[in-house]
Image (tube, rainbow, N blue to C red):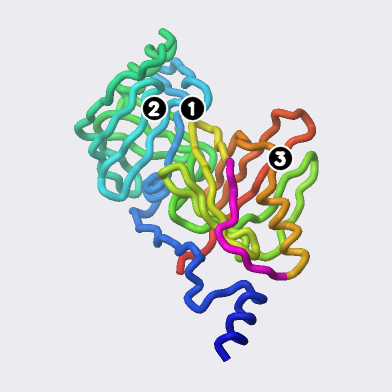
């Protein structure tokens, strides 16, 4: 009986405890309204407006802020990192004491330093939260009407949650992925990625830097078999010819995609969708 059970599990690609599966980390709850959209996600700064004068942020999402569920925020002014005490409600944000980190070893251009000073002054004290266009874009406005324009950079629960691979982008076409919730990625803050490629679990490297995701070394950690269609797809997913692959990514509230367009029209990318908790 034990031999038969082992054979059946090998064919179906399961184990009694399903030990290879990554578990979903429940997403904490924040306030409602616009403040609830801010908390738990990372936002990059697009520009600041002071006295009607617009100053554009440095490129590649160098200036950003991530709002935690513990009344803190961390971010980067463009060159210098910071941490701050924050209180977020449905419509307002209060920024308390801030601690700046060490200046980077790399040179910070004068234009970026000037932007940093404006952002540092604006990101302080009481601010109201307004949607600019939709729930992906917010303005953090002070009492004088000056504001910080931010846009969603990382969706809620990016790390430690399962993201179903919804489709692949190949050239100018979108290829659906078979296998449903059996094909998912779990990104981790330490720069690793785990998940399931349809039949087998895998691990690899996945580092988010600015607006670029670099992913490499996707390697099977199990050796199960299943349908030929899933096996062929898994082979394509884990045998990417370009290693590492650097992709520019963009996010919606419950999905994000990353695309490598360095080869002109012959570009490649992934599209992920959030999986439900539980």
Asked whether 217 falls inside the magenta stretch, the response is yes
**Secondary element at tag 3:** loop
277 w.r.t. 4: above or below:
above
In terms of depth relative to the viewer, which is nearer, 53 or 81?
A: 81
Which residues lie in the magenta part? 216-226
For residue 193, say whether it is visible.
yes
Quarter of the picture containing the C terminus is bottom left
Could you classify mark 3 by the number of other residues whose Cα lies within 10 Å: few (under 14), some (14-19), or many (20 or more)?
A: few
Asked whether 184 falls inside the magenta stretch, the response is no
In terms of depth relative to the viewer, which is nearer, 178 or 68?
A: 178
Q: Earlier in the sequence, mark 3 or mark 1?
A: 1
Q: Position of residue 202 (x, y in %)?
A: 56, 56
Q: CA distance from mark 2 to mark 3?
A: 45 Å
Residue of label 3: 241
Q: Is residue 71 left or right of residue 1?
A: left
Of tags 1 and 2, which is closer to the observer? 1
108 w.r.t. 183: above or below:
above
For the point 57% across and 91% down, the residue is 1
Could you classify mark 1 by the number of other residues whose Cα lies within 10 Å: few (under 14), some (14-19), or many (20 or more)?
A: many
Q: CA distance from mark 3 to mark 1?
A: 34 Å
**Secondary element at tag 2:** strand
Of tags 2 and 3, which is closer to the observer? 3
For the point 68% across and 51% down, the residue is 237
Q: Position of residue 59 (x, y in %)?
A: 52, 22
Checking the image for residue 46, the label placed there is 1
Disc 3 to disc 1: CB gap under 8 Å: no
Checking the image for residue 147, the label placed there is 2
Residue most extreme to the top: 110
Checking the image for residue 106, the label placed there is none
Q: Position of residue 17 (x, y in %)?
A: 47, 76
């Amino acid at each position: 009986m034990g031999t038969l059970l082992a054979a059946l599990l090998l064919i179906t690609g399961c184990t009694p405890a399903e030990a290879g599966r990554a578990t979903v980390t429940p997403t904490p709850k924040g306030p409602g309204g616009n403040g609830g959209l801010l908390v738990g996600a990372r936002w990059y700064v697009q520009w600041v407006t002071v006295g009607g004068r617009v100053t554009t942020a440095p490129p590649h999402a160098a200036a950003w802020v991530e709002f935690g569920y513990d009344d803190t925020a961390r971010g980067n002014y463009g060159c210098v990192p910071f941490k701050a005490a924050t209180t977020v409600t449905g419509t307002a944000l209060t920024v308390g004491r801030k601690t700046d980190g060490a200046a980077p070893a790399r040179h910070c251009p004068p234009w970026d330093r000037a932007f940093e000073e404006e952002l540092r002054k604006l990101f302080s004290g009481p601010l109201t939260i307004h949607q600019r266009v939709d729930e992906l874009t917010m303005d953090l406005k002070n009492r004088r009407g000056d504001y910080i324009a931010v846009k969603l950079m990382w969706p809620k629960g990016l790390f430690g949650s399962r993201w179903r691979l919804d489709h692949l982008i190949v050239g100018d076409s979108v290829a659906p992925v078979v296998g449903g919730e059996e094909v998912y990625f779990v990104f981790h803050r330490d720069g690793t990625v785990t998940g399931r490629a349809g039949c087998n679990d895998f691990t690899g490297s996945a580092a988010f830097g600015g607006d670029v995701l670099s992913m490499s070394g996707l390697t099977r950690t199990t050796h199960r078999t299943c349908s030929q269609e899933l096996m062929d797809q898994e082979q394509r997913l884990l045998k990417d010819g370009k290693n590492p692959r650097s992709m520019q990514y963009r996010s919606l509230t419950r999905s994000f995609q990353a695309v490598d367009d360095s080869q002109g029209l012959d570009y490649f990318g992934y599209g992920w969708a959030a999986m439900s908790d539980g």
